């Protein structure tokens, strides 16, 4: 273990980078001290809030650049001065920017926001998509694609030596609490070879090996390896941690090692804290069901290719051995047809690269992240257009100064270079601030991504992030710096000598500025439209009919695995009774599945004879097992027949309750109550009598809507290990009852672990992706609108200033002020109309990329389009109004006198 | 640093801070901020520029030998050289003369008014 050294924050590292502006001899002398000094100041400033910190870093960054250059210019004290035309330009550029601080600050801040947002998104994408696992030779790692495998399959792959090195693992929550409310951490059950295959060595102690992976515990009994984070956080970083006992899921483990910092396990976006061998699951559960069950699909398999072996070659080997593997691991008790499917599956096993690790995060977030990256890219372009406009206006105002320089003998290249240097300083400072902003923003975003389980991503900037930000900064400097620099080419030296002439209309640069504004309006229309569509998707999802009322409800996930199976049924009834007795509780009931809770259970339904023939996909129905009063607890309605009854126990005739969608799909034309439904459950087909019909409700998610569901009495199903207790309160917020309900559960079922959530929180967590996309798209849509409005304001007031004389003369000649107002506003409307046309076309094209992310709204929804256009026009008219008013109030007499 | 010119007040404050005792860089900065009541807005960038100039001019040197208790991250202590003290003293005299001249002028004005 390396000695615990203080980790340097991103800003400190950036400052270290900035110090490179200083000459070497200076750095050799002062670098360490300067970093320390800035760190100390930063610590003080941090207490004053974000504003002070931003100001501090702006000043510090600017100073480092300025003094660094100054230091280089002054040269070594006794050496000759190194004349450099470039450093001259930097100093002039810095001074000239200082002369117009408002322009500089506005430009730097909008750039920082634009570059920062881009970098934040890119760091997340980088971490999810591009960064490789912190293990040795990650490019040799492959996973068997698509889904999970049974332990017998894994053992076949291991024993047949399909790969030189391979391991299987299961990422799951592990409970550290002895009993009562559970204390879950992220854990990994892994086969003994995991650390060897990944090439990860323990930072302290040892990792576990194949010898430890034993169904009876191995030579040292059950052993566990913990992460560096867990060691620091939960075990106080104690050096004597090796050998300590740790109770996980009720089993005592001996801690044998700590993983190195930066190793989070085989999954990306998930930081595992505890690693234990797979074999221990047999001791923990008291049976080998998980390990020997041939239809328990729970393991993922990762392998290391031999040096020089390609993925295709390894896949071929795997597929060649697949029939033998499958034959040896075939579930014996399955019906013949399913066994045949098992032996020759439609999709053979395939290997894919695992260099970047496995990630469910990637699957669910990559598309939204990419869309948001495009959105923030567009925002950056709009910001650049604004700055280009700003600098163009500034360059025009400085025509006299610049032409004077030309007249005094400066070369055009020199003047153009100074303007470019100004842009470079702006974008450089913007990029540095943007990186700091990105660090904060991406951490915030990742925090938002976290649902029940914390998402942990390595967001430290690597060369990709720095190259990305640097590239963006250079590109932006060129984009907005080029136009004014090119303007120098048309500058006449003798212009300075002439009195400035009366407003020249039809200047070419004015045309460029208009084009920029039209582009801005077009892009912001697309972004506002996108933001509106995502907001509507989110609100439709959160207000979508659920079929039950979540507000007065809380749900408790109960782990009853330590309750003796023979007593489970009676004990669970006692649990429900105890919770119902808590004052304020209106109803309580048990189920195996919580609607929209993530877990699912389905079955194939054989339609009754004479019914419509359905393809297999249409024959699937969701399943839940519920206790009496479950529908009442969810405020659902029994529309016909009866609820689950206390008499529906094992031995009594098997019954089922179905929802309306189920009745529509499978029982069309039949009387629902009394219908016989046959369900294929594993190897057997069971027949149930439908005794009740309930209203439709959401099962999987609000997005999936109402689907067929069949409910079985929980007492007729083999006692479940893990179930959900739903509680409805009589009035007020369910949060207030959490403590007393928790106490009742702990009293009634002391050996069970449980976690409590509010139903509304759980539903909220289910729409995290949509919430984040809506939030970001809405925010950046608004930002784009603001920037476009600023751009319009700038270009309009600039044009009014240029046309002061012309407007004054018009007024003097009898034009009415209303006419002037209309003329100016008319131009704004015209510009916006052009932008809307271009933006409309652009959005039609872009709509196909977001269609799959929307819910209940089409990407070309005319109402949303009309709304976005109206918002845009309102913002534009507001922005144009002020300069228009100013134009209308020009005093013709004063204008004429000025000339 | 051009020593024929009077020192800037910032450089003077830095010398003043070191006149009392040897200090490491950050402590010098803190002392200047405190003593000047925040009027000299010394920040890392500007401070080290001044410091390097003062070192180049031979007014300040790195103190030889490091205090045992000092935080190694803070870097070296700085020490005012004899030449530095001289310059500080001559500045002091120069400024005292200036203040005396101003006081004399003010009191004579007052007398004139009386």
Image (cartoon, rainbow, N blue to C red):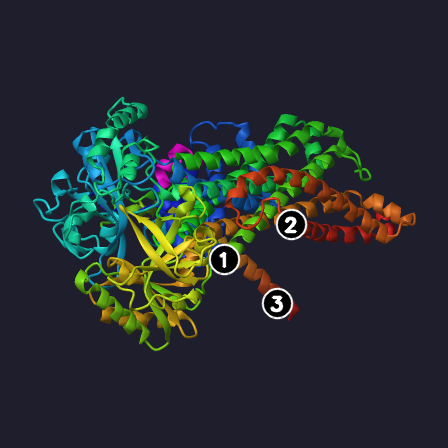
The residue that disc 1 covers is A542
Q: Residues within 10 Å of mark 1 (few under 14, many from 20)?
A: some
The residue that disc 3 covers is B110
In the image, is residue A437 part of the stretch drawn in magenta?
no
Q: Residues within 10 Å of mark 2 (few under 14, many from 20)?
A: many
- Majority SS type along the magenta span: helix
**Secondary structure of the residue carrying numbered label 2:** helix
To which quarter of the image does residue A190 belong? top left
**Residue A115 in sight here:** no
Label of residue A868 in the image: 2
Taking the image as shown, residue A390 lies to the left or right of residue B22, namely right
Q: Residue furthest bottom?
A: A583
- Which percent across, then down, holds residue A519? 65, 39
**Residue depicted at x 34% and y 50%:** A679
User: How far is the residue under mark 3 from the one under mark 2?
Assistant: 73 Å
**Residue depicted at x 27% and y 56%:** A184
**Secondary structure of the residue carrying numbered label 3:** helix
**Residue A610 in sight here:** yes
Label 3 lies in what chain? B
Q: Which label sits in the foreground, 2 or 1?
A: 1
Taking the image as shown, residue A296 lies to the left or right of residue B2, namely left
Taking the image as shown, residue A20 lies to the left or right of residue A482, namely left
Residue A895 vertical placement versus A653 (above, below): above
**Residue depicted at x 56% and y 61%:** B104
- Which percent across, then down, holds residue A510? 73, 37
User: How far is the residue under mark 3 from the one under mark 1?
Assistant: 81 Å
Instruction: Give, as a single range, the part of the protein colored magenta.
Output: A19-31
Taking the image as shown, residue B53 lies to the left or right of residue A521, namely left
Given contact means CB atoms under 8 Å apart, are the residues at marks 3 and 1 in contact? no
**Along the line of sight, the residue nearer the viewer: B30 or A278:** A278
């Amino acid at each position: 273990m390396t000695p615990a050294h203080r980790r340097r924050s991103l800003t400190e590292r950036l400052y270290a980078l900035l110090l490179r502006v200083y000459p070497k001899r200076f750095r050799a002398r002062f670098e360490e001290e300067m970093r320390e000094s800035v760190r100390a100041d930063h610590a003080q400033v941090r207490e004053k809030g974000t504003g002070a910190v931003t100001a501090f870093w702006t000043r510090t960054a600017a100073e480092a650049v300025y003094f660094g250059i100054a230091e280089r210019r002054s040269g070594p004290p006794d050496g000759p001065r190194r004349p450099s035309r470039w450093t001259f330009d930097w100093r002039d550029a810095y001074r000239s920017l200082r002369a117009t601080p408002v322009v500089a600050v506005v430009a730097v801040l909008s750039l920082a926001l634009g570059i920062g947002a881009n970098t934040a998104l890119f760091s997340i994408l980088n971490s999810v998509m591009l960064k490789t696992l912190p293990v040795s030779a990650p490019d040799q790692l492959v996973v068997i694609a698509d889904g999970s495998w049974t332990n017998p399959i894994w053992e076949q792959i291991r024993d047949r030596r399909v790969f030189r090195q391979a391991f299987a693992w299961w990422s799951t929550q592990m409970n550290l609490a002895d009993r009562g409310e559970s204390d879950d951490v992220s854990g990994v059950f892994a086969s003994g070879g995991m650390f060897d295959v990944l090439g990860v060595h323990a930072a302290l102690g040892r990792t576990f090996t194949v010898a430890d992976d034993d169904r009876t515990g191995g030579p040292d009994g059950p052993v566990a390896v913990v992460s560096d984070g867990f060691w620091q956080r939960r075990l106080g970083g104690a050096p004597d941690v090796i050998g300590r006992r740790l109770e996980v899921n009720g089993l005592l483990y001996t801690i044998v090692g700590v993983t190195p910092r930066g190793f989070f396990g085989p999954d990306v976006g998930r930081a595992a804290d505890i690693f234990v061998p797979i074999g221990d699951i047999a001791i923990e559960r008291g049976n080998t069901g998980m390990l020997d069950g041939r239809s328990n699909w729970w393991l993922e398999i990762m392998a290391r290719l031999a040096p020089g072996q390609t993925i295709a070659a390894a896949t071929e080997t795997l597929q060649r051995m697949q029939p033998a593997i499958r034959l040896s691991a075939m579930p014996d008790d399955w019906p013949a047809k399913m066994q045949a499917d098992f032996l020759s599956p439609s999709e053979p096993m395939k290997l894919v690269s695992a260099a970047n690790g496995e990630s469910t995060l990637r699957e669910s977030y990559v598309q939204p992240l990419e869309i948001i990256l495009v959105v923030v890219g567009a925002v950056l372009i709009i910001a650049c257009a604004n700055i280009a406009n700003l600098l163009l206006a500034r360059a025009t105002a400085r025509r006299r100064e610049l032409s004077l320089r030309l007249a005094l003998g400066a070369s055009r290249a020199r003047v153009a270079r100074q303007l470019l240097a100004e842009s470079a300083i702006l974008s450089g400072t913007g990029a540095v601030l943007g990186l700091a902003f990105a660090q904060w923003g991406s951490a915030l975003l990742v925090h938002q991504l976290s649902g029940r389980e914390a998402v942990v991503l390595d967001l430290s900037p690597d060369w990709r992030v720095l190259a990305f930000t640097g590239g963006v900064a250079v590109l932006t400097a060129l984009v907005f710096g080029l136009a004014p620099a090119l303007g120098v080419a048309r500058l006449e030296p003798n212009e300075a000598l002439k009195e400035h002439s009366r407003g020249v209309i039809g200047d070419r640069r004015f045309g460029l500025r208009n084009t920029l504004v039209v582009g801005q309006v077009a892009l912001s229309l697309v972004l506002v439209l996108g933001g509106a569509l995502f907001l509507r998707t989110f609100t439709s999802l959160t207000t979508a009919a659920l079929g039950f009322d979540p507000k007065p409800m809380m749900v408790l996930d109960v782990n009853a695995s330590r309750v003796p199976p023979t007593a489970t049924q009676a004990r669970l009834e006692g649990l429900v009774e105890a919770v119902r007795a808590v004052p304020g509780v209106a109803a309580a009931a048990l189920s195996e599945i919580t609607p929209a809770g993530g877990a699912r259970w389905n079955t194939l339904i054989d339609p009754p004879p004479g019914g419509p023939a359905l393809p297999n996909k249409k024959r699937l129905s969701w399943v839940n097992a519920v206790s009496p009063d479950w529908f009442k607890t969810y405020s659902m309605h029994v529309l016909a027949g009866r609820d689950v009854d206390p008499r529906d126990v094992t031995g009594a005739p098997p019954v089922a309750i179905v929802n309306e969608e189920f009745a529509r799909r499978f029982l069309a034309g039949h009387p629902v109550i009394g219908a016989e439904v046959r369900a294929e459950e594993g190897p057997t087909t069971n027949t149930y009598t439908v005794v009740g019909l309930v209203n439709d409700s959401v099962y999987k998610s609000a997005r999936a809507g109402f689907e067929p569901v069949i409910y079985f009495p929980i007492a007729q199903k083999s006692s479940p290990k893990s179930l959900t207790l739903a509680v409805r309160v009589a009035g007020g917020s369910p949060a207030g009852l959490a403590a007393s309900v928790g106490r009742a559960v702990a009293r009634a079922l002391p050996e069970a672990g449980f976690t409590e959530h509010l139903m509304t929180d759980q539903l909220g967590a289910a729409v995290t992706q949509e919430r984040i996309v809506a939030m970001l798209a809405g925010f950046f849509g608004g930002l784009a609108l603001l920037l476009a409005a600023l751009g319009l304001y700038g270009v309009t007031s600039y044009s009014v200033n240029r046309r002061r004389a012309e407007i004054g003369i018009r007024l003097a000649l009898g034009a009415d002020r209303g006419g002037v107002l209309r003329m100016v506003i008319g131009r704004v409307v015209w510009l916006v109309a052009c932008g809307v046309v271009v933006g409309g076309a652009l959005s039609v094209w872009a709509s196909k990329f977001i269609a799959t992310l929307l819910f209940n709204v089409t990407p070309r929804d005319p109402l949303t389009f009309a709304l976005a256009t109206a918002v845009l026009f309102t913002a534009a008219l507001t922005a144009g109004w002020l300069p228009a008013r100013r134009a209308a109030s020009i005093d013709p007499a004063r204008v004429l006198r000025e000339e | 640093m051009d020593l024929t010119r009077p020192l800037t007040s910032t450089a003077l404050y830095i010398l003043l801070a070191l006149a009392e005792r040897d200090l490491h860089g950050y402590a010098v900065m803190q002392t200047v901020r405190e003593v000047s009541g925040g009027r000299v807005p010394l920040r890392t960038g500007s401070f080290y520029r001044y410091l390097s100039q003062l070192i180049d001019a031979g007014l300040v040197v790195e103190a030889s030998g490091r205090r045992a208790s000092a935080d190694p991250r803070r870097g070296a202590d700085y020490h005012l050289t004899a030449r530095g003290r001289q310059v500080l003293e001559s500045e002091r005299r120069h400024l005292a003369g200036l203040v005396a001249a101003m006081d004399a002028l003010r009191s004579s004005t007052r007398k004139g008014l009386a």
